[in-house]
Image: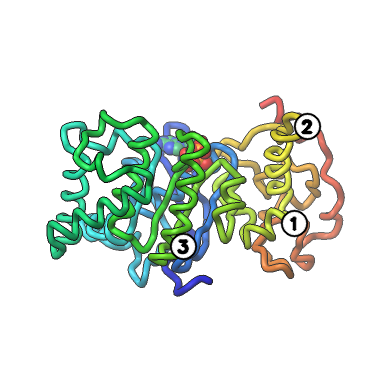
């Protein structure tokens, strides 16, 4: 179902300078995205999902630094100048973030927002076409044409969020980052947005990176899923395969904590994600991992491809030749108590 490769991220690193030292929020991340494909990015709070999404679009705050390679249709986004990147944003690179009011101008009608956006990025299209395309996109988001000339404050928060999404979609970008697009919305609107995102990739072949806490949305709307922990992708693969048979203990625990919410009460993964200034040695998940082995605390795990086609970075899956003798012994547990107290 997926088309040509739109985005290829290789060994991306992003760090924030702080008084305590660099916070390595994204630390050696690689993934590809094809036309018409949706990749869900999940993981606990603070694992670096938003930093990754913003880093790919060149939208990092001052003080953040990025390194690696981001190939977008043959252009290295980390290598291009500010101006060129700004030209790509909108028509080629779209973004949907959470805070709608911060980007709708309260003094401008909704129609003017659309006119301005299309005039800036697609100056060749005329007035009628602008109006037709804008109303059509709004209608898809459940905003009736009668509201086209209203002002932002005349809409509810959920509607403003949908208008923001329509403003990103009206340009039909090749690649969109949607960071928690449905968090502030009710369940019905959420379902509607998921339908629209599916529509989008069918009709316009858009590639989408969908960052969310909601694993249900990923199961429903994503082709593939990448699971992030402490700045790295620990597992990535077909969404159905990953949810059906998670290969990394972190993925398994994350899924368990979600399923328990609807069934027998809360299951938490003990402890919390590590400090990214001084992350644990070896596998960053080892202090919390129920399956940790001796090697996990000492050596960085190596990415392997499972027979099912999942990318997984966990010593449980080898490579066997790299595990020192005795490395498969169960990790002595006092380290976990220390991590819990910290
Ligand atoms: N501007 C900043 N300066 C310093 N550290 C930052 C900054 N922004 C984020 N961080 C740190 O980078 C790490 C990753 O944060 P990020 O927001 O990318 O995670 P996330 O997985 O998107 O979390 P959430 O799901 O809560 O949005 C965290 O440790 C966070 O504290």
Q: Is residue 296 left or right of residue 72?
A: right
The image shows residue 159, relative to residue 308, as above or below, that is: above
Count neighbours of disc 3 (C-alpha within 10 A) and say few if under 14, some if 14 to 19, many if 20 or more: some
Q: Residue at x 23, y 42 (%)?
A: 148
Count neighbours of disc 1 (C-alpha within 10 A) and say few if under 14, some if 14 to 19, many if 20 or more: few
Q: Is mark 1 within 8 Å of ligand 1?
A: no
Residue depth check, mark 2 versus mark 1: number of the one nearer the observer: 2
Residue depth check, mark 3 versus mark 1: number of the one nearer the observer: 1
- Which of disc 3 and disc 2 is earlier in sequence? 3
Residue 342 in percent (x, y) is at 66, 27
Q: Is residue 106 visible?
A: yes
Which residue is nearer to you in this view: 256 or 23? 256
Which residue is nearer to you in this view: 143 or 211? 143
- Whether residues under marks 2 and 3 lie with C-beta atoms below 8 angstroms apart, the answer is no
Residue linked to disc 2: 264
**Snapshot quadrant of residue 77:** bottom left
Q: Residue at x 50, y 47 (%)?
A: 211
Residue 192 in percent (x, y) is at 47, 46
- CA distance for labels 2 and 1: 21 Å
- CA distance for labels 2 and 3: 39 Å
Residue linked to disc 1: 245
Residue 320 in percent (x, y) is at 79, 65
The numbered dot on residue 9 is: 3
Q: Residue at x 64, y 33 (%)?
A: 272
Q: Residue furthest front?
A: 146
Residue depth check, mark 2 versus mark 3: number of the one nearer the observer: 2
Q: Is residue 24 left or right of residue 117?
A: right
Q: Is mark 2 within 8 Å of ligand 1?
A: no
Q: Is residue 21 visible?
A: no
- Which of disc 1 and disc 2 is earlier in sequence? 1
- Whether residues under marks 3 and 1 lie with C-beta atoms below 8 angstroms apart, the answer is no
């Amino acid at each position: 179902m997926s088309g040509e490769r739109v985005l290829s991220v290789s060994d991306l690193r992003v760090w924030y300078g702080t008084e305590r030292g660099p916070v390595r929020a994204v630390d050696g991340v690689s993934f590809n995205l094809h036309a018409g494909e949706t990749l869900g990015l999940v993981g606990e709070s603070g694992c670096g999902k938003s930093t990754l999404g913003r880093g790919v679009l060149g939208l990092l705050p001052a003080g953040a630094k990025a390194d690696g390679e981001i190939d977008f249709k043959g252009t290295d986004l980390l290598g291009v100048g500010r101006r060129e990147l700004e030209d790509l944003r909108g028509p080629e690179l779209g973004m949907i973030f959470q805070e709608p009011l911060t980007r709708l101008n309260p003094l401008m009608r909704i129609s003017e927002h659309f006119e301005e956006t299309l005039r800036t990025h697609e100056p060749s299209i005329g007035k009628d076409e602008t109006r037709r395309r804008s109303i059509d996109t709004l209608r898809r988001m459940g905003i009736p044409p009668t509201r086209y000339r209203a002002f932002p404050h005349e809409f509810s928060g959920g509607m403003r969020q949908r208008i923001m999404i329509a403003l990103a979609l009206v340009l039909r970008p090749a690649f969109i980052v949607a960071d928690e697009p449905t968090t502030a919305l009710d369940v019905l609107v959420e379902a509607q947005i998921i339908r629209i995102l599916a529509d989008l990739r069918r009709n316009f072949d858009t590639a989408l990176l969908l960052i969310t806490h909601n694993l249900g949305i990923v199961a429903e709307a994503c082709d593939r899923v990448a699971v992030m922990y402490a700045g790295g992708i620990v597992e990535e693969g077909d969404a159905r395969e990953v949810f059906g048979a998670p290969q990394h203990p972190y993925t398994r625990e994350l899924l368990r904590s979600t399923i328990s919410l609807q069934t027998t009460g809360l299951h938490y993964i003990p402890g919390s994600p590590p400090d990214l200034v001084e992350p644990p040695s070896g596998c960053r998940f080892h202090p919390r991992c129920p399956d940790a082995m001796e090697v996990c605390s000492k050596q960085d795990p190596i990415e392997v491809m499972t027979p099912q086609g999942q990318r997984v970075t966990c010593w449980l899956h080898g490579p066997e030749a790299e595990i020192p003798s005795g490395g498969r012994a169960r990790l002595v547990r006092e380290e976990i108590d220390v991590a819990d107290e910290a």
